[in-house]
Image: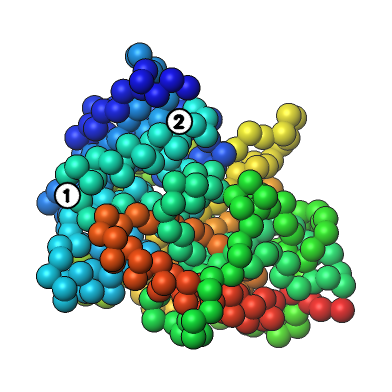
Amino acid sequence: MAESAIIARVLATALDVDAAAWNTLLAQQSHPTPFMRHEYLAALETSDSATPRTGWAPRFMTLWEGDTLIAACPLYLKNHSYGEYVFDWAWASAYEQHGVPYYPKAVIAVPFTPVPGSRLLARDDAARALLVQAVCQWCEDENVSSVHILFASDDDVLTSAQQDLMLRHTVQFHWKNVAPTLPAARGSLPPEGALTALGRPGGGENVAPTLPAASDAPSPDSTLPGGGSGQPFKDFDHFLASLSHDKRKKIRQERRRVADAGVSFRWSRGADISAADWDFFYRCYERTYLEHGNPPYLTRDFFARMAAHMPEAWLLFVAERDGQPIASSLIAISALPSSAGSQKDQNIVAYGRYWGALERVDCLHFEACYYQPLQWCIEHGVIRFEGGAQGEHKMARALLPVQATSAHWLAHPAFADAVERFLQREGAGVAEYLSELHERSPFKTA
């Protein structure tokens, strides 16, 4: 690639980016998700969810070769660290204590969405490297303190490391639709995880563990929960049979409590989700945030735009009692290239996103957010369910720990050195934490 022929343009809004060109570039990436589609990012702006008013000032970095878009990423200037799920409050505090401004900072992420996936959209590795260089150079020129690429794909991580960005790892919990192979029924994912919180003990001056290069790491679906190969679960009982006795018993008890309370569920997908159901979902979603003392990140208009422009990406579960809706959970679904002739939704990934309830029922959260979605995934041949950030309790529902990675560039050399040392110490704690988690597999052991 002749670098002199590449032009960088920083655009002020997603609306200035050609939607077809963006989505075409996204489709070429190794880990596309619906949250990086142009429709999703544009809806965040036009619904007043992610805007300068809410602390998310968009700047879309684009690279062009003639009239062809060859690389792009969403870039937000932030004056706070809310809605990111990779916590850097301690870094901001350290800057403040030394009289150095940490904000504005630049975040390459999907606002309010801790879902791993491609962030640096590029036609090839060379273009991806140029994109990282262009972002860092622009931030340095604009006196922006730092760049943070959150929940990045393997390709993004590899490029970021090659460009000397610092890596940080967080733990998420994902479920895979594969019956484990005994006797190796211990979670066999590699040590790919970390903490989203800053404060977990790091363990002295140990350096961070050596992690596999992105090109050598297993794909999200190549490693099975119990090791070796296996077949998808036949039904929910088949899934339960793979679990240890205590986990199986607990899930059955929790589901029974919901059923005994007279609660039943129905689901709707895509265009079949009615306007009334969307309205009810938002009542539940809004109440969940307000009960925790904060307004919701996403507006009702955002979900109206999802229903209008991305209906195929959503699956809604509604809990009812005595014929009245009382709770709901919203799941995102992402179709990947499917097998020819398949009659099921194979190669779809499901993402647990939002939930809320108007009435309190014991264990209703677990039923709405885990058991109903997992049962749906099994019945429809979905390959993976991503449970989102944090939550060790998810392991009791057979969601196993996996690594999500962010990459960081700090303009201030002294602070960059200090953060790098911190990440080394944190990495030692991460390795210990992952080892502990893998010893607590919910699956049967021989």
Residue 397 lies left or right of residue 187; in this view the side is left
Residue 10 lies left or right of residue 223; in this view the side is left
Q: Position of residue 116 (x, y in %)?
A: 49, 53
Which amino acid, by three-letter code, is at mark 2?
Ala
Whether 286 is drawn above or below 277: the answer is below
Which of 356/19 is in front? Answer: 19
Among numbered discs 1 and 2, the one appearing first in the sequence: 2
Query: What residue is shown at x 64% (from left), y 68% (from top)?
Result: 191
Q: Position of residue 236 (x, y in %)?
A: 71, 63
Which of 39/341 is in front? Answer: 39
Whether 439 is drawn above or below 209: the answer is below
Label 1 sits on a secondary structure element that is loop
- Which residue is the site of mark 2? 127
Can residue 202 be seen here? yes
Which amino acid, by three-letter code, is at mark 1?
Asn
Q: Position of residue 279 (x, y in %)?
A: 30, 52
Whether 318 is drawn above or below 119: the answer is below
Label 2 sits on a secondary structure element that is helix
- Which residue is the site of mark 1? 143
Marks 1 and 2, how far apart at CA? 24 Å
Q: Farthest residue to the top: give it.
A: 66
Which of 57/424 is in front? Answer: 424
Few, some or many C-alpha atoms within 10 Å of disc 1 (few <14, some 14-19, many ≥20)? some
* Residue 439 position by quadrant: bottom right
